[in-house]
Image (tube, grey):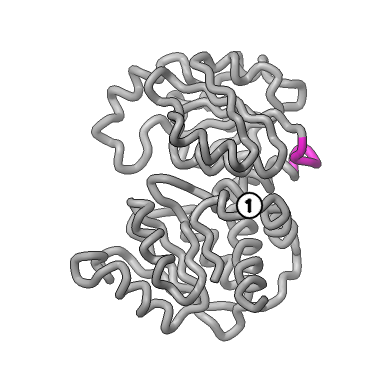
Amino acid sequence: MRHFLDIDDLTPSELARILNLASDPKPPQVLAGRGVALLFEKPSARTRSATEMAVVQLGGHPVYIGAAEVGLDQRESVEDVTRTMGCYSAVIGARVFAHSTAERMAAVSEVPVVNLLSDHAHPTQAVADLLTMRDAMGHLEGLKLAYVGDANNVARSLAYAAGLSGIALRIASPPGYEFGESDLRPMRQCGCEPVQVDKPVEAVRGADVVYTDVWASMGQEEEAAQRRQDFTGFTVNRRLMTQAAPGAVFLHCLPAHRGEEVEAKVIDGPQSRVWPQAANRMHAARGLLLWLMEQAEA
């Protein structure tokens, strides 16, 4: 049984296969008459909408399950909830706080488990990011990608995706917010050796794609004031974008805080591919579900 907890669960050829399946305008109805359980510990806009619609496009029925309905490790254990959902569903998608929750689910599940986000990874976002870069640039191999911000779950999955796709990655983070050696080791195994710098211009110079994320993610609200101070000078603005390569595009996984991590005239400007990127969340989820069904039937 194949699960999808992060991008490094895949080989380069498997990731390429998912991208190609995601681009199929008339996908086979592999989920016809079947349900997909979508468990959300954390609220979401794009992830829920994108995944529900991907299930519908494959002929299936998405079943949204909120945190209060199951009470993980309070009303029932993670393992018991997982086994129960597997009785009714062809796939289980989970947007959770702790990555260990997704790992526990995969350990007992008899159907594929998809990590829709955890504190460690955001792999479905990374698939959508690759689709967006390929759409914008026509290829992935050899692209130069600059990520400006916190070395967080989004950046981690993006690094794995870059390594498996032949993309050179540079990451600009303030001191104390960069990846440590324990993070870099699995990235190297995926073929990614990110260059880490503490000045945004060093990351962005000559980049084909410039990417950023919020400075304080959901669950980090108490750190927001300190992070705004620490990330002073890390706003992706028009001046910074002039350092990128001609024809460079801007990405953001959303939600965005205009005036903090990105200037409004960048995210709403002509170089932005943020809305196609958001749309690709649905296509990415569809390609991933198709691939998982292929693996389950192999």
Q: At 68% across and 58% down in the image, what residue appears?
A: 18
Q: Position of residue 19 (x, y in %)?
A: 70, 55
Q: Position of residue 253 (x, y in %)?
A: 52, 41
Image quadrant for the C terminus?
bottom right
Q: Is residue 67 left or right of residue 112?
A: left
Q: Looking at the image, which is closer to me, 188 or 226?
A: 188
Q: Is residue 66 left or right of residue 12?
A: left
Q: Looking at the image, which is closer to me, 147 or 58?
A: 147
Q: Is residue 222 visible?
A: yes
Q: Position of residue 266 (x, y in %)?
A: 59, 26
Q: Residue furthest right?
A: 138
Q: Amino acid at mark 1?
A: Asn
Name the residue tied to disc 1: 280
Q: Residue furthest left?
A: 74
Q: Position of residue 182 (x, y in %)?
A: 44, 35
- 10 in relation to 92, above or below: above
Question: Is 94 a magenta residue?
Answer: no
State the SS at label 1.
helix
Q: Is residue 225 left or right of residue 40?
A: left
**Within-10-Å neighbours for mark 1: few <14, some 14–19, many 20+:** many
Q: Residue furthest bottom?
A: 33
- 293 in relation to 34, above or below: above
Numbered-mark total:
1
Q: Quadrant of residue 140?
A: top right
Q: Is residue 270 visible?
A: no
Q: Is residue 254 left or right of residue 215?
A: right
Read off the magenta span. Answer: 135-141
